[in-house]
Image: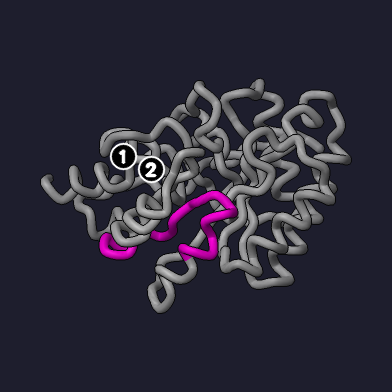
Amino acid sequence: MPIEISEAPSVVGSPAQDWKPLAPRINSRLIKADATYASIEQLCAQASHSGCHSVVVSPAHIGLCAFLLSGTPTRIGTLIGFPHGASTTTTKRYEALDAIRLGAHNLELVMNVSALKSGDRIRVEGEMRSLAEIAHDNGALLHINIEVALLSLEEKILACQLAVASGSDGVSSGSGFNPVSSLPSDISLMRGVLGDKVDVIASDGIETLEDVHSIIEAGASWITTDSAAAIIEAARKK
């Protein structure tokens, strides 16, 4: 597959100036191992009140979120194959189906980074395609989490190309699990490879309003962050 990079569309270049247009571009994430039911309830209440696009939680918390967010427009997202993407495709398929059954709308498949780095592009694309079919057959979206901070330039480009070829709905930069964060330059590269037909989700290392503005300017469709409440509050005060 040839490497082609298009120019990022100008439509995604304007930073939000206040919280009302900003909140619908934010996915509020809480996937910590010690997250309590009370903290998930707080997450859902804040996200719904602020008008966030979605909450992103561990699979075990999907059912609670579905109950708490019933009747609201706030969507529910979860990670499939978290944290390393090293589960078998069979396991990931079951996990995706179970997540949808429990109420998830947005699935984020953690790519098998080991397979990509080993040059096994057939396995990587096949898994992406399999999960995309499950998601779409059940009314959900699938984004591919490529853990961009762990990849070389060529691997970043290839991962994005395989995501498009598989029929996925877009690419997420990372899970927030790895200590190294993606940069605006990574988001710009992803947007350039993906074009304007699919989503680019910036999803690690975003903690401040300034981070959000720089990432949106770089071409992100949505922001996934553990700091959604603080970011929106900062935007309210502008």
Number of other residues with Cα within 10 Å of mark 2, as a class: few under 14, some 14 to 19, many 20 or more: many
- Residue occupied by mark 1: 213
84 or 122: nearer the eye?
Answer: 84
- Residue 31's disc is none
Task: Name the side, left or right, on which 64 lies relative to 86.
Answer: left
Q: Is residue 176 above or below residue 196?
A: above
- How many angstroms separate mark 2 from mark 1 (CA)? 5 Å
Quadrant of the image occupied by residue 3: top right
- Measured as percent of width and height from the top left, residue 167 is found at 73, 57
Residue 11 shows in the view: no
Instruction: Give the magenta part as a residue range.
Output: 48-65
Task: Name the side, left or right, on which 71 lies relative to 22.
Answer: right
Number of other residues with Cα within 10 Å of mark 1, as a class: few under 14, some 14 to 19, many 20 or more: some
Q: Is residue 46 above or below residue 161?
A: below
Q: Residue at the spot x=70%, y=27% of the render?
A: 155
Give the total number of marks visible in the rendering: 2
Task: Name the side, left or right, on which 193 lies relative to 233.
Answer: right
Q: Residue at the spot x=18%, y=43% of the render?
A: 234
- Which secondary structure lies at badge 2? helix
Kind of residue sitting beneath label 2: Ile
- Measured as percent of width and height from the top left, residue 223 is found at 42, 46
- Measured as percent of width and height from the top left, residue 163 is found at 71, 46
* Dots 2, 1 in contact, CB < 8 A: yes
Q: Is residue 62 magenta?
A: yes
- Residue occupied by mark 2: 216
Quadrant of the image occupied by residue 216: top left
Q: Is residue 183 above or below residue 128?
A: above
Q: Residue at the spot x=29%, y=57% of the render?
A: 46
Residue 141 shows in the view: yes
